[in-house]
Amino acid sequence: FVDLSGNPIPGVSNIEETGKSGEPLTKATEVTTEIAKLIAKGYDLVSNNYGKDNDGNFDKDSSKDQEYTVVLTPHIQDVPPFDPKDPNDPKTPQPGQPIDPNNPTGPKWTPELIKELEDGRKEEVKRTIKYVYADGSKAADSVQETKEFKRSATINPVTGKITFGDWSPAQTFEAVTSPEIKNYTPNKVTVPASEVTATAEDINETVVYTTK
């Protein structure tokens, strides 16, 4: 039982049998049972050549052992976008649900995995513009805007490792004209536009009004 690179699957022992030339192989059920166990752990079956030669019998070459290989690989499950704030979103993973919907007996979602998924696939960048007088008191209502970024995710049910894709493209906070206040002049007539990516820091702008 090996992976795509030919490395043994952890925790699985070889299945061995002996017999006479021409006699039927006897371990097909054990092989099938072990495959089923590994699928339940989150693997996909790639190939199984057990008994595919000699009509499922022991061969007549006693100088070397017959060897068969079962190749498996961890199932990589796409996780569709969902709204964590909407408990009725059917795509939202729930603790105890199978990670792979097509493998109901396979590994399940845990609260820890769900939190890691929610925290890792969405990011927000905020811009806050404050309008104040020279003494720091409020001159006008602040303006707050938020840009939301998302990215795809896959999970390896065998290891529980979540892999994230690239963030959605950069977005732009448009330029904002400072409000007019009678007898006062802002130090910034316009707060300029700003292009931001998911990893950008929040933007804090302060427009100060002084007497004309």
Image (cartoon, helix red, strand yellow):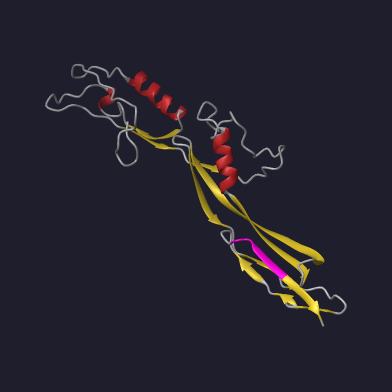
Which image quadrant is residue 43 in?
A: top left
Q: Tell me: 210 left or right of 172.
A: right
Q: Position of residue 52 (x, y in %)?
A: 30, 29
Q: Is residue 11 left or right of residue 82?
A: left
Main SS of the magenta part reads strand
Residue drawn at (62%, 46%), measured in percent from left and top? 81
Q: Is residue 183 left or right of residue 175?
A: right
Q: Residue at x 27, y 19 (%)?
A: 25
Q: Does residue 53 sit above or below 136 in this rendering?
A: above
Q: Is residue 142 above or below residue 165?
A: below
**Would residue 203 be counted in the magenta stretch?**
yes
Q: Quadrant of the N terminus?
A: top left
7 is within the stretch colored magenta: no
The percent position of residue 124, horizontal first and vertical second, equals: 64, 55
Most extreme residue toward the right is 182
Residue 20 % position (x, y): 18, 16
Q: Residue at x 86, y 79 (%)?
A: 183
Residue 149 higher or lower than 139, as above or below: above
Q: Nearer the viewer, residue 33 or 93?
A: 93
**Image quarter in which the C terminus is found:** bottom right
Q: Position of residue 144 (x, y in %)?
A: 74, 61
Q: Foreground: 186 or 176?
A: 186
Residue interval drawn in magenta: 201-206
The residue nearer to you, when weighing 202 against 54, is 202
Q: Say which quarter of the image contains residue 131.
A: bottom right
Q: Which residue ends up furthest to the bottom in the rendered image?
A: 212
Q: How many marks can you see?
A: 0
Extreme residue in the front direction: 135
Compare residues 96 and 132 and report the one nearer the observer: 132
